[in-house]
Image (cartoon, grey):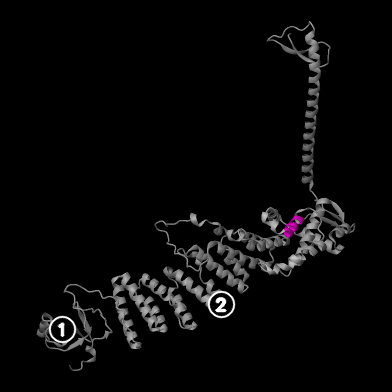
C-alpha cells in the first residue's frame, strides 16, 4: 500500500476512537480524516476506511452500497473494531481508558480522546458519562505519575463551558484521595492549591474546600509558619455551611481559635470562640432530626477523624482556659474547669476528676469576691467528691466561715499543695497566683471585720490584718473603689466607719419601718394580754358556776336563754340563765 497523505491519516489513540462531530451531516460510522470523510467497514476482521472525497460520485455510491468491496479511492486499514451499528441509530461511545506504556505522547493522545468523550457527554447532558470521563482523566494522570498534567487537567475541565457541577464535585473528591500519595511535599501543596482554587466560590464543593484549607494550614503549621496557617483558616466561614456536620463545624472553628492563640492574637480568638454556643454541647444527639424534611439540606457525615461532641466540649474549654489565663480571669477559668468536670467520662474516673477538682478549688480562692464566686463556692462545698481531697475542703471552709484568717499560718499549710499544682492538669497556677492569693485573704478579712464592727480604728484594723497602716489603708481603699465594700476613713482621727450614710428619704423610710415594727409589737402584746385575761376569767367562772347550780334562784334553761351576770358572787362571771 502506498503511503497516505498526512491529512488522510486516521489518528487512533491506542484503541480509543476519536470522534469529532462535523457541522455537516455525517452518517453513523463516518469519521472525519483531514479534509475528507471516510467510511469504516469490516473486511475479514480488518477495518477498511474509504475516502469518499477522492472518489467519483458513482464510485462513492458503489462504495456505500458494497462496503466489503474496494471501489476506487484510497483506503486506510486500521485495527480490528466491532461492526458499525444499523443505519438510523446513533452510537454513544463509552469513555474507553487508553493503555499507557510510559510514553508522554500516548498520555496526551489518551487525554485528548477522553476530553472529546467528555465533551460529547457534557453537551448531551449525560451526568453519569461526564462524571466518569472526568474521573478517568484524573486516574489516568495519577497512574502515569504526571502530577503537573493532573493539575492542568483539573483546571481545564472545571473551566469548560457549561460544565456540570456533578462532574466537578466528583473530580475534586477523586483528586483529594491522591493528596496523601504525592511523591513530595511541594507536589502535595501544589495539588491542594489547585483543588482549592477550582472549588473557590462554588457552593456545591464548599465542604471539600474547607477540608483542603485545613490540610494546607496543617502543613504550614508543621513548617513553622503559624501566621500563614492562621490566615488560611480564617478565610473560611464554616458556620454558614448548611450541609456540613455540626461536629465538623465545631472542630474547624476550634482549630481557628487554637491557631489564633498560638500566634497570640487574643482578640480574634475571642471573636471566633463566640461563634460556638456553650449550649450546643448539652444537646442530646438522640433527639436530633434523623430524616430531613423535603427542601432541607442533606447534612453530610463527619469524617472519622473528627472527635465526638463531648470530646469537642473538653477541647473548647481547654482553649478557653488558655484565653482567660492571658487576662488572669480566675472566675472564668474556674467555670471552664467546672464544665470539664461535669463531662461524664471525666467524672467517672477519679484519676481524671481529682486534678480538675483541685484546679476548681484553687481558682475559686483566687477569684475576687462577688455573688457568682460565692455561689460557686457554696456549690463546690456540697460536692461529695471533695471529701477525697480534705485539704482543699478545709481551704474552702475557711473562706465560707466569717472569721479572720492568718496569712502566715495558711501559707505554711498550703505551700506544698501550691507547688505541686505544676505536676497536675493545667500546670502551674501562674506567676501572680501567690500574690493574688494573699490579696484575696486580705479582702476576706476586711469583709469579716466589716460584719462585726461599725467603727474601728485604723491601727486596730491593721493589727487584725497583720499589715502596716499604709497597706491596710490601701487595701481598704481598693475595695471601696471596686464597690465590694462601703466604708469611710477619718484620717485625722484614724477611724474607719463601715456604716452607710443615708439621705433624708432613706432616714424617713427607716423611721416608717421602725414605727411599723413597733405597732406590730404593741398589737401582739395586747393580744397576748387579752388571751391571758380570758383564760383567768374562764377558771373563775367554772368555780362560781358550781355554786350557782346549788342555789334556788336559777331557773331551768330554755331556748330563750341569754348570758347575763349573776348576783355578786364574782366580778365578771357569765352564766346562762333565763331573763
Q: Is residue 107 left or right of residue 255?
A: left
Range drawn in magenta: 390-398
Measured as percent of width and height from the top left, residue 549 is found at 78, 10
Measured as percent of width and height from the top left, residue 419 is found at 74, 68
Instruction: Please say if 330 is above or below 537.
Output: below
* Circle 2 crowding by C-alpha within 10 Å: few under 14, some 14–19, many from 20: some
| Residue designated by label 1 | 44
Measured as percent of width and height from the top left, residue 329 is found at 68, 64
Q: Which of 215 and 19 is in front in this view?
A: 215
Instruction: Please say if 157 is above or below 335.
Output: below
Is 392 within the magenta?
yes
Depth check, mark 2 against mark 1: the one in front is 1
* Circle 1 crowding by C-alpha within 10 Å: few under 14, some 14–19, many from 20: few
Report the magenta stretch's main SS. helix
Which residue: 10% across, 83% down? 62
Q: Can residue 428 be seen in this snapshot?
A: no
| Residue designated by label 2 | 221
Which residue: 48% across, 71% down? 210
Measured as percent of width and height from the top left, residue 15 is found at 27, 82
Amino acid at each position: 500500500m502506498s503511503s497516505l497523505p498526512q491529512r488522510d491519516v486516521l489518528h487512533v489513540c491506542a484503541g480509543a476512537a476519536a470522534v469529532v462531530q462535523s457541522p455537516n451531516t455525517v452518517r453513523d460510522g463516518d469519521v472525519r480524516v483531514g479534509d475528507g470523510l471516510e467510511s469504516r467497514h469490516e473486511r475479514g476482521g480488518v477495518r477498511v476506511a474509504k475516502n469518499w472525497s477522492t472518489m467519483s460520485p458513482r464510485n462513492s455510491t458503489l462504495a456505500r452500497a458494497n462496503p466489503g468491496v474496494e471501489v476506487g479511492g484510497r483506503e486506510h486499514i486500521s485495527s480490528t473494531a466491532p461492526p458499525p451499528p444499523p443505519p438510523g441509530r446513533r452510537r454513544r461511545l463509552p469513555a474507553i481508558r487508553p493503555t499507557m506504556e510510559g510514553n508522554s505522547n500516548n498520555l496526551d493522545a489518551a487525554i485528548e480522546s477522553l476530553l472529546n468523550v467528555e465533551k460529547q457527554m457534557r453537551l448531551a447532558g449525560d451526568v453519569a458519562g461526564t462524571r466518569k470521563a472526568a474521573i478517568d482523566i484524573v486516574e489516568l494522570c495519577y497512574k502515569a505519575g504526571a502530577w503537573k498534567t493532573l493539575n492542568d487537567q483539573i483546571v481545564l475541565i472545571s473551566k469548560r463551558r457549561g460544565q456540570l457541577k456533578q462532574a466537578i464535585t466528583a473530580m475534586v473528591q477523586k483528586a483529594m484521595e491522591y493528596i496523601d500519595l504525592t511523591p513530595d511535599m511541594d507536589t502535595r501543596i501544589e495539588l491542594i492549591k489547585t483543588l482549592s482554587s477550582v472549588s473557590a466560590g462554588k457552593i456545591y464543593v464548599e465542604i471539600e474546600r474547607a477540608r483542603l484549607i485545613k490540610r494546607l494550614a496543617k502543613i504550614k503549621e508543621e513548617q513553622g509558619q503559624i501566621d500563614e496557617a492562621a490566615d488560611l483558616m480564617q478565610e473560611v466561614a464554616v458556620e454558614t455551611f448548611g450541609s456540613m456536620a455540626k461536629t465538623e463545624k465545631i472542630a474547624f472553628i476550634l482549630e481557628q481559635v487554637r491557631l489564633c492563640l498560638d500566634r497570640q492574637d487574643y482578640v480574634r480568638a475571642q471573636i471566633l470562640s463566640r461563634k460556638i454556643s456553650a449550649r450546643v454541647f448539652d444537646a442530646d444527639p438522640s433527639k436530633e432530626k434523623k430524616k430531613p424534611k423535603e427542601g432541607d439540606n442533606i447534612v453530610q457525615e463527619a469524617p472519622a477523624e473528627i472527635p465526638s461532641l463531648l470530646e469537642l466540649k473538653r477541647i473548647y474549654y481547654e482553649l478557653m482556659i488558655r484565653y482567660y489565663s492571658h487576662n488572669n480571669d480566675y472566675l472564668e477559668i474556674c467555670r471552664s474547669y467546672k464544665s470539664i468536670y461535669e463531662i461524664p467520662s471525666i467524672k467517672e474516673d477519679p484519676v481524671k476528676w481529682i486534678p480538675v477538682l483541685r484546679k476548681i478549688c484553687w481558682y475559686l480562692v483566687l477569684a475576687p469576691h462577688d455573688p457568682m464566686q460565692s455561689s460557686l463556692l457554696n456549690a463546690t462545698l456540697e460536692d461529695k467528691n471533695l471529701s477525697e481531697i480534705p485539704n482543699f475542703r478545709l481551704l474552702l471552709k475557711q473562706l465560707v466561715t466569717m472569721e479572720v484568717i492568718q496569712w502566715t499560718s495558711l501559707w505554711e499549710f498550703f505551700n506544698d499543695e501550691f507547688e505541686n499544682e505544676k505536676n497536675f492538669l493545667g500546670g502551674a497556677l501562674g506567676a501572680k497566683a501567690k500574690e493574688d492569693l494573699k490579696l484575696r485573704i486580705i479582702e476576706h478579712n476586711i469583709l469579716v471585720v466589716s460584719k462585726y464592727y461599725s467603727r474601728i480604728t485604723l491601727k486596730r484594723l491593721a493589727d487584725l490584718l497583720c499589715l502596716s497602716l499604709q497597706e491596710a489603708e490601701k487595701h481598704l481603699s481598693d475595695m471601696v473603689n471596686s464597690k465590694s465594700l462601703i466604708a469611710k476613713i477619718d484620717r485625722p482621727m484614724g477611724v474607719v466607719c463601715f456604716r452607710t450614710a443615708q439621705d433624708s428619704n432613706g432616714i424617713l423610710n427607716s423611721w416608717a419601718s421602725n414605727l411599723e415594727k413597733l405597732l406590730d409589737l404593741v398589737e401582739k402584746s395586747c393580744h397576748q394580754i387579752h388571751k391571758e385575761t380570758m383564760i383567768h376569767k374562764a377558771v373563775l367562772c367554772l368555780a362560781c358556776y358550781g355554786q350557782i347550780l346549788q342555789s334556788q334562784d336559777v331557773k331551768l334553761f330554755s331556748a330563750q336563754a341569754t348570758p347575763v351576770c349573776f348576783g355578786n358572787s364574782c366580778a365578771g362571771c357569765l352564766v346562762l340563765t333565763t331573763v
